[in-house]
Image: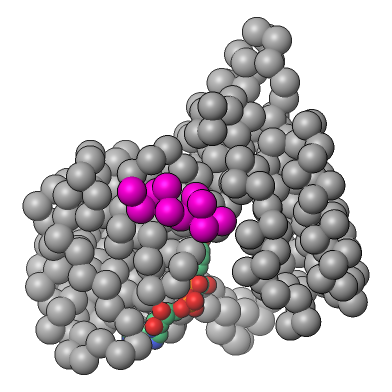
Amino acid sequence: MYELIDGKATSAAIKEEIAEEVKQLVKEGAKTPHLAAILVGHDGASETYVASKEKSCSQVGFNSTVLRLEDDITEADLLEKVEAVNNDPGIDGLIVQLPLPAHINEQKIIEAIKPEKDVDGFHPVNVGRMVIGLPAFVSATPAGILELLKRYNIETSGKSCVVIGRSNIVGKPMSILLSQKNDFGNATVTLCHSRTPNLKEVTGQADIIIAALGRAEFLRADMVKEGAVVIDVGISRIRSDKTKSGWKLLGDVKFDEVAPKCSFITPVPGGVGPMTIVSLLRNTLLASKREIYK
Ligand code: NAD
């Protein structure tokens, strides 16, 4: 029988811990942590993500600001906005909601954010620091997955882990974190991607599989060994005539088929997703306490 890894309940518990710490810090005279988000345009999914980040901030007692900008803003003007937040001592963390309109160079914007305020952990300075094991803001989704593994006492040391997907925000950092020499690292990691032949043979050997490729129900039972731990990062919005909204969310794992073979598995929704936001809150708290860059 598998154990369900409940990201919703875990994230709620962590939010309470953060809220408690904020209350204590403020009581001791520290400033209230403050997260700013820049939202360009009116993309539905981006609006939803930013709204839920704002709600989470208020749940833990943070201040939050959303800078809403039109999608015809020039790159130069957006860079100026980023610079203004960089220089605002009242703001601890800044995220720029992606994707940005095609005429704006995303990488240029990411690199304009001060590493000390880059609570998404996307700036090359934070990525580089993470790779060599220095204190860094770690990308929220892989950080959230590590936290789930910790809280469910899932051993990674000496295990064989397969990460599917090599994005800069999930797959790549995840593979590095799991292979690092520390608690909840020390795994032997294989990073798979769209050019990996015989994927089934590779995943079939894995003790832990992290599926982050964005293909609905891609991971099937015959790709997973008995007793594996399966972490499903994928979120695909699929049309459905069975839901009120007309949409349903599917992960990268065919859950009903794979779960019976697993020791632990995350659901979608309610698995990795809620943990991503909590990691962002934690990074913002670290930023306000100046714990990464002293
Ligand atoms: P991405 O979309 O940038 O890249 C997908 C990766 O998957 C690529 O590296 C590609 O090589 C690999 N891939 C594609 N098809 C493959 C195949 N057939 N076999 C093996 N590898 C294949 O990745 P992303 O931004 O990390 O997003 C992946 C998924 O995770 C998406 O569904 C996204 O919505 C979701 N996501 C969820 C959260 C969360 O909080 N739960 C956060 C970030 C991303």
Left or right? Give the position of 78 relative to 282: right
Query: What residue sits 44% from the left and 72% below the top?
Result: 167
Residue 123 shows in this picture: yes
Residue 250 shows in this picture: no
Question: Where does the image place residue 151, in percent across and percent down from the top left?
Answer: 32, 39
Residue 213 or residue 82, whichever sits in front: 82
Query: What residue sits 68% from the left and 52% below the top?
Result: 113
Q: Main secondary structure of the magenta part?
A: helix
Question: Where does the image place residue 35, in percent across and percent down from the top left?
Answer: 71, 41
The quadrant where residue 198 appears = bottom left
Q: How is the image coloured?
A: one colour
Ligand 1 placement by image quarter: bottom left
State which quarter of the image contains the C terminus.
Answer: top right
17 to 131, vertically: above or below:
above
Left or right? Give the position of 53 relative to 160: right
Residue 221 or residue 177, whichever sits in front: 177
Left or right? Give the position of 221 relative to 255: left
Left or right? Give the position of 205 relative to 257: left
Query: What residue sits 70% from the left and 64% below the top?
Result: 109
Query: What residue sits 38% from the left and 74% below the top?
Result: 166
- Per the image, is 124 magenta? yes
**Can you name the residue that lies furthest to the top here?**
28
Residue range highlighted in magenta: 123-132
Q: How many marks?
A: 0
286 to 142, vertically: above or below:
above
Question: Where does the image place residue 216, in percent across and percent down from the top left?
Answer: 43, 82
Residue 278 or residue 41, whichever sits in front: 41
